[in-house]
Image: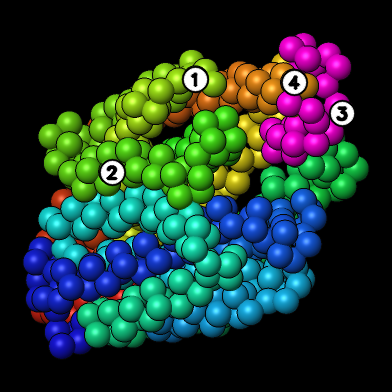
Amino acid sequence: MSIEDTPAPESGHPRRRPALAALCLALVVTTIDNTVLNTALPALAEALSASTADLQWINNAYTLVFAAMLITAGSLGARLGHRRALVGGLTVLALASASAALSGSTGQLIAFRALMGLGAAFVMPATLSIIVALFGPRERGRAIAVWSATAGIGIVAGPVTGGLLLDHFAWSSVFWVNVPLVVVALTAALLLVPALPGRRAGRLDIPGLLLSATGLAALVDLVVQGPERGWLSAGTVVEACAAAALLTAFACWELRTAHPMVDVRLFADRTFSVASGILGITFFALFGLLFGYTQYLQLVHGFSPFEAGLGALPFALSMAATAATSDRSTARFGPRNTIAAGLAVMAAGLAGLSFVTAGTPFAVLALTMGAVGAGMGLVMAPASTASMAAVPREKAPMASSVNSVVRELGGALGIAVIGTVVSASYRSHLAAALPGAPARAADDLTSAHLVAAELLPGPAGQLIAAANEAFTAAMDRGTLLCALVALLGSAAALARLRRRPITRTPAGTPAGTPAGTPDQAPARALEKGEVPVPSHGE
């Protein structure tokens, strides 16, 4: 049965639930693909003789291309059909993963990681756009809640899978594992997801495509490279000006062209802009926390990569639990109160983590990480649903792409800002605790442990103890900043989100418009089983 045979929008497409399972699997695979590499960086450094700069590019090439191409991929998906975009993205992901596993140099690996980011850019917005197309208003919130909950599975599955593989196999195994996972997701998508024919909305917006891709690439590179180059260095300032100029030109062009790739006027909608911003704030706090927390578990507590991955299990389980039931909280308390409460709980968990010491028991860490995950679970689905409900249904792909870009930028900015704070604080605390420490030990905690391995037992023990304490204190400062950001997000949700956001019909008319008006023609078509496919520029 094709999507054109869909019954009334209240019930949705008959194959919506099997399709949701396939879409969630694709999301998990993409999330694993983005997080599994972190545990393999030390092995990569040894096997490929990779420098610190090489490792950064191996890690960041994916993020750079992924974020830069999200809006373009969403626009092309709307034209070609979202299932085609999903299948194409998964195919590119599988081929790039296999090629990355066979890489013989850091240059090759960086190139294939960038190609993996391109494939993921087509997968991520397609999954949410298809959910919006297949589910009626009554079930859409629950479907997005399930979709958000699966992200928690991917967050923990990536590090755990990577750690387990590296305990038994070479570094290439973290890329080979993606191939069978993607094949399963690809098969499920072909069998379970209905074909969604694209809708051509005038000519392809080539200038908008180029301006958005280059502007976002410059912005992400600025955020990622800023801590290393220095925020006030000439290169950083020039790139900031270039990013601002390109994105301003993009917005001006989209306002003038007859068939825009992104309708920037939608940012004037308070619910859409605030809900999208809250997603960015949430990922800022999460990735800012994880920057120091993973190092803390492996270097301060001495966990193996696999054990460190398991250390994220309380976060993932609590996030999945609250995200899967967040639609009930939203129905009872409203999205504004649910989102604000979720960010407040997240801030409380982060504040608790800002008091950890080098000897804090894992039970305490698990409890506080569980609170962070529970709070995030209450935010993700309601914020995503609120932003999608604030736009006309045919513009859902644009909203989905924008949300993905904001999440990615928030995470990158969290790592950059919190990483800068932690690094500066670490050097300060180490210099105060051990004035005679070797200069290389002040670079980062990993360097301190490597330097200690070259010293006699007595000085080595002093250096490791001082470095661990210094890093823990620095991580506490960074985590406290994350808590403050989450708390500000909670206040913004209470102040700026509507208690009950206005939902819109496929024509973009606020719900409740009297039947029979011209704007209800698409709704009547829906009732006849003719489901319009979301697209850009209409």
Region rendered in magenta: 430-457
Q: Please, what is the three-letter code of the amino acid marked with disc 3?
A: Ala
Circle 4 residue: 458
Q: Of callouts 1 and 4, which one flags the residue occurring earlier in the amino acid sequence?
A: 1
Between 141 and 517, the one nearer to me in the picture: 141
**Residue 62 drawn in magenta:** no
- Local packing at callout 2 (Cα closer than 10 Å; few below 14, some 14-19, many 20+) is some
Real-space Cα separation, disc 1 to disc 2, in angstroms:
24 Å
Q: Which residue is mark 1?
A: 359
State the image coordinates of residue 424 (x, y, percent, origin top left).
Answer: 74, 25
Nearest the viewer among 178 and 517 is 178
Earlier in the chain: of badge 3 and badge 4, it is 3
Residue at horizontal 42 percent and vertical 53 percent from the top: 160
Query: Which residue position holds label 3?
Result: 439
Q: CA distance from mark 4 to mark 2?
A: 42 Å
Mark 4 closeness class: few <14, some 14–19, many ≥20 residues within 10 Å: few
Callout 4 secondary element: helix
